[in-house]
Image (cartoon, helix red, strand yellow):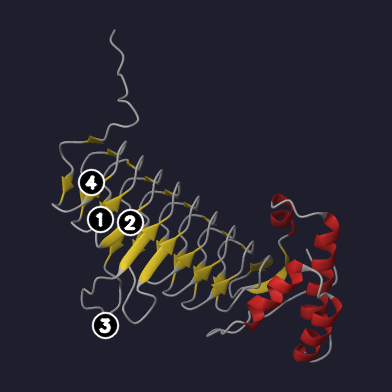
Amino acid sequence: MNEAVSPPAEFTVIHPSAVIARGAEIGSGVQIGPFCAIGANVVIGDGVELVSHVVIDGHTHISSGVKLYPFSSIGLAPQDIRYKDEPTRCVIGARSQIREHCSIHRGTPTGLGVTTVGTDCILMAVTHVAHDCTLGNGVIVANNVVMGGHVWIGDNAIIGGQSAIHQFTRIGRGAMIGGVTGVEADVVPFGMVVGNRGLLTGLNVIGLTRLDYERPRIHRLRAAFRLLFAGKSVFAERLVQIRAQFADEPLVTEMLAFIDQPSKRGLIHASLSRDQEGK
């Protein structure tokens, strides 16, 4: 029996049923499966794989090593009634995986003008990334998550399944959103949020450990977190105290820098019991 032989990695293989518009740029070693459709302004980097039934349109750049699974749609027009087919963009970072039925829309001229997914991200099935969203590197988004426009998610954040993220919300680096959570306001770096209307319930200590932060640094971040979100004084006074007490701890200064940035949604509310503080 003859076995199927895979083509050399530098060869590009395009299934006869795929439709590729004139003007699209296809890199080397690309695999384009059955019934895919690629628009004229699309750029596909080296080693990208489109499994089947993938649609890519608009001024979209798919970086090297990305894998797109069936029925995902990338770079289509945003769901914004003010959008008039302006040449806004969509960028998918290297080695990211976009699973079945994901939709990632391009930006709008009234927003950033670009929707960005970083490198080494995993977007699980039926994720929706709306216009002008920015996802950092190493972000994991579980099944059935929906994002409004202009959402910003920092590196290595994890978004639990069936969560909904309000437009203009920021989620800090290394944060974790529990499943079926409605996120209506900003989540500080390494924060943990859960609930029908999400509340900040502690720190993502597991995530910090996976990022190889040592226990003394985690303990200092936990102490600052407890003071900031479980203290009894005015929030502004707690910020002043933390700036003075933890000025030499980069994780704390990162959290404070996040809080200092302009926000359209404000900080998400905390709900910390004594045994939850700093978890």
Q: Nearer the viewer, mark 1 or mark 4?
A: 1
Left or right: where 201 falls relative to 45: right
Q: Earlier in the sequence, mark 4 or mark 2?
A: 4
Crowd tier of the residue under label 3, counting other residues whose Cα lies within 10 Å: few below 14, some 14–19, many 20 or above = few
Residue identifier under label 4: 36
What is the crowding at mark 1: few (fewer than 14 residues within 10 Å), some, or many (at least 20)?
A: many
Q: Quadrant of residue 11?
A: top left
- The image shows a total of numbered marks equal to 4
Residue ID for mark 3: 82
Q: Spatial distance from mark 4 to mark 2, Cα to Cα?
A: 16 Å
Instruction: Say which residue label 1 marks.
Output: 42
Residue at the extreme top of the image, as rendered:
1
Name which residue type carries label 4.
Cys
Q: Is residue 257 above or below residue 64?
A: below
| Helix, strand or loop status at disc 2 | strand
Labels 3 and 4: the sequence-earlier one: 4
Considering only order in the chain, which callout, 1 or 2, is on the residue closer to the N terminus? 1
Q: Give the percent coordinates (x, y) of residue 247.
A: 81, 75
Q: Closer to the N terminus: mark 1 or mark 3?
A: 1
Question: Which residue is tagged 2?
Answer: 61
Q: Nearer the viewer, residue 215 or 17?
A: 215
**Distance in Å between CA atoms under marks 3 and 2:** 24 Å
